[in-house]
Amino acid sequence: MVLNELGKIVFKNLKNIPYYFENINLDKFIVMPNHVHLILEINKNIVGAIHELPLQKRRNMLIPKIIGKFKMLSAKEINILANNSGNPLWQRNYYDHIIRNEIELNKIREYILENPKNWERDRNNIV
């Protein structure tokens, strides 16, 4: 993927996640034309069940805080650049998944790295 100016803003804000959250490392990630894939490594056992909680309580949990901050900072910067203040940039939700073993981790890493090669056939490619 060759990033345009907006993609570079998204890339920068992804790279900055560990600076805002001390217990988080960024593993593999990719910025695609209309979505991102990333693996976050949590260094301490500080996350509980997410899906079972109401939206208001989820916002106080680590993963929603990380994704919320990333979306907020990147959208603010992009909207300033595009002179498009106040318009939503990101969809409301996101897909998350707990990686439970090394085999699964390696498969997801491979998927992320291979994703750009498969962009023309990707279901998210609406071009």
Image (cartoon, helix red, strand yellow):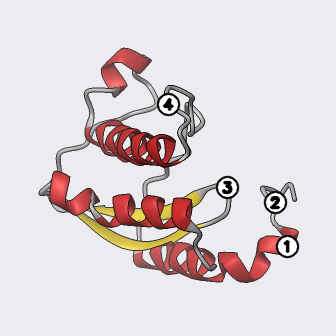
Tally the marks. 4
x and y percentages locating residue 48 in the rendered image = 28, 37
Instruction: Identify which amino acid the numbered label 4 is placed on.
Output: Ser
Q: CA distance from mark 4 to mark 2?
A: 26 Å
Classify mark 1: helix, strand or loop.
helix
Quadrant of the snapshot with the N terminus: bottom right
Q: Residues within 10 Å of mark 1 (few under 14, many from 20)?
A: few
Q: Which residue is mark 1?
A: 120
Q: Which residue is mark 4?
A: 85
- For the residue labelled by badge 2, is the local secondary structure a helix, a strand or a loop? loop
Q: Residues within 10 Å of mark 3 (few under 14, many from 20)?
A: few
> Residue sitting at 32 percent across and 41 percent down?
69
Q: Amino acid at mark 1?
A: Glu
Q: CA distance from mark 2 to mark 3?
A: 8 Å
Q: Nearer the viewer, mark 4 or mark 3?
A: 4
Taking the image as shown, residue 46 lies to the left or right of residue 50, namely left
The answer to whether mark 1 and mark 2 are in CB contact below 8 A is yes
Name the amino acid, label 2. Asn
**Mark 3 — residue?**
34
Q: Earlier in the sequence, mark 2 or mark 3?
A: 3
Is 74 rendered above or below residue 127?
Answer: above
Determine if residue 116 is in view.
yes
Residue type, mark 3 in image: Asn
Which of disc 3 and disc 1 is earlier in sequence?
A: 3
SS state under label 3 = loop
State the image coordinates of residue 107 (x, y, percent, origin top left).
56, 78
Please provide percent x and percent y for residue 34. Answer: 67, 55
Residue sitting nearer the eye, 80 or 11: 80
